[in-house]
Image (spheres, rainbow, N blue to C red):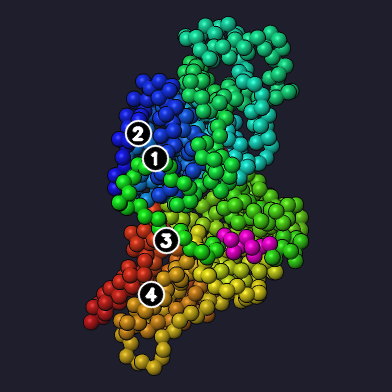
Amino acid sequence: MNVNFEKTKYLKYADYKTIKDFNYYQLEILAKEIRDYIKEVIYHNGGHYGSNLGVVELTISILRNFDPLKDKIIFDTSHQSYTYKILTDRKEKFKTLRTFGGISGFSRIKESVFDHYGAGHAGTGLSAALGYAKAKDISNEDYNVVAVIGDAALTCGVTFEAINNIGQYPTKMIIVLNDNEYSISRNVGAISMYLKKLRNNPLILKIEEKLDNLLNKIPFDSTLKEWIRDTKNWVEEGFTKIVSPSVIGVIFEEFGIQYIGPVDGHNIKLLDQIFSFAKTLGKPVIIHTVTQKGKGDDEAESHFERMHGVAKGKVKPSNFIYFSTDEGMKIDDFTKSTNKTYTEIFGEAIIEIAKNDDKIVAITAAMPSGTGLVNFSKNFPDRFFDVGIAEEHALLFACGLALGGLKPVVAIYSTFLQRAFDMLIHDVALQNIPILFLLDRAGVVGEDGPTHHGVFDLSYLRIIPNIEIFVPSNEIELRNIIYTVLKNLSKPTFIRYPRDFVEGLELSEFKEIDLYRWKLIHQTKQDNENYKNKIIILSTGRMQKNIDKIIENLEKENIYLKVYNCISVKPLDEEVLKEVVNFDLVVTLEDNVLAGGFSSSVLEYLNDNNISKRVLRFGWLDQFIEHGSIQSLFQNYQLDSQSITHRIISKLNLYANIRS
Ligand SMILES: Cc1ncc(C[n+]2csc(CCOP(=O)(O)OP(=O)(O)O)c2C)c(N)n1
């Protein structure tokens, strides 16, 4: 597949070196062409849309003022690093964004020498930047450290740990606050309100040095110089009053970080001047830029939430056609299912149940739409809490709510719960606090890749005492598990489900079910006595999707099968496990890493009960799983039905050879 940059006016020439010589007129056109390219690629591959459209000028200016090879430019979360990728030697490859083997949707050290830090989870940027800055000081090196952070990532607890530490170890570093007022939904909390106050005030530069000295430091006559002169006038006219902490309280200054802003994040000329000035300051500085999320696309400018991250085909392709039309990048049918998602099924179920139980409250950490809680928040505004990107706090807050007599439901992505591991053990489980956790995006998530795959939860949860873990394999099971758990909620309970469309089954009334018994879903007809082998398959959750094909393939090979759907991963169904003595092979299937996961618990049970059986385990191996469509991952990592069948049969043949 080709990308035709020839049709572009400036993008074809643009990279981090050449853009330094572009004039502002050319840069304006370049910014538009970059936006068009981003739109086109996201149309084909999906991706983070609004955030990337918002930071085009900001990134251009950063690259004009810093050297991305030498200077350490770090993007917090790094979902907004597309322009950076395009201008740092990945222009052509950018068309492969988020595809298997292609460019990642996030920064990755492994992908490029220009990526100085990898991320995907929010709030890691300032700490890493401070680390780089101190390393530079200690090794007597000379480079700039620039951290770009969004207004929502700024609210993460860990960001404030970094700010606290920057105050302790002040060193030269530049923090670029990209304030677009939005997280995925509108940003929430007191810090966001505080930023709003700053945003609505005139450009502020609280200067410790004498203004005249400062003016002399700036070599050229510039917009910045005028702005400082203005500031000088304000000072003379009582500007200090405007910026005095009692009125605005520039908290960053209290932490020893010089504040500059708010600055129009789309004005490359002004940004250039601010960055070249900031470089002359030998201390931590925060430049508060204000940008428009979704800039350049009317729909994205007004529907921030929906357009934060989009699936392929969900945005308008740009009018500028870069891709030759006859090749590749077809829209994948997988994204076109008319069925609901597990997320939607949860979102509807929890409303139905909460109508009859006013103790139920729901909590999200900045993901109301991602976790399916938007309608709940509308139906029960007083029983809904978006705590911002603050997973640790979310859990502790839920503990308090539960101890106060409510039934908290925490809807969270599997990967983001990792943040709160200590709270899981030290607060939730140790105190045996009844909270229901809905772990969305469990298993591989596809194009977002290794920072987002939820493949560790069975392992990190299973080791914790007091808790129970359930894994539905279809929407009816999900509904009934939620219903049953909430009816009897007495301990920390986890329900994990994938980023998938459901089966499309007809939904029935909620039913209380036996959560602890694994369900026999298939048994080979008994009338044929000539089976070569007998296998018991223990399957969990999403792995059921392929089970029919596996059963068909194996029975064709004259293999006797008994197949269980293991809804409860903790506790295990020991009745079923006792049966395994009657089989030649135990096969386990899970969408989790094998290390410490469901299969590990089966092995432990068999070992501890002196049951000697061969177990063939299917799940993710001890490596990070790359990005790519979910199907491509299952195929490339050999967890599709063909590969599973093939491996089972070769294992049986191997055992047969050993026996003979
Ligand atoms: C720890 C963690 N929780 C949740 C998320 C999901 N998430 C991805 S981007 C985002 C919003 C980030 O907002 P902001 O930092 O303001 O950047 P913007 O997208 O507005 O540019 C969230 C909540 C995440 N990446 N990491």
25 to the left or right of 227: left
Which of the marked residues, 1 or 3, is nearer the chain's N terminus? 1
Q: Is residue 374 magenta?
A: no
Residue name at image x 40 percent, y 58 percent: 332
Q: Is residue 345 magenta?
A: yes
Asked which secondary structure carries label 2, the reply is loop
Residue ID for mark 3: 333
Residue 651: horizontal and vertical position, in percent?
30, 73
Amino acid type, mark 2: Thr
Asked which secondary structure carries label 3, the reply is helix
Residue 8 — which label? 2
Distance, label 2 to label 1, CA atoms, is 9 Å
Residue ID for mark 1: 320
At label 2, counting other C-alpha atoms closer than 10 Å, the crowd grade (few under 14, some 14-19, many 20 or more) is some
Tell me: residue 451, above or below residue 147.
Answer: below
Residue 46: horizontal and vertical position, in percent?
44, 49
Residue name at image x 60 percent, y 72 percent: 507
Distance, label 1 to label 3, CA atoms, is 25 Å
Tell me: residue 17, above or below residue 658.
Answer: above
| Nearer to us in this view, 239 or 314 | 314
User: Any atom of ligand 1 within 8 Å of the CB at mark 2?
Assistant: no
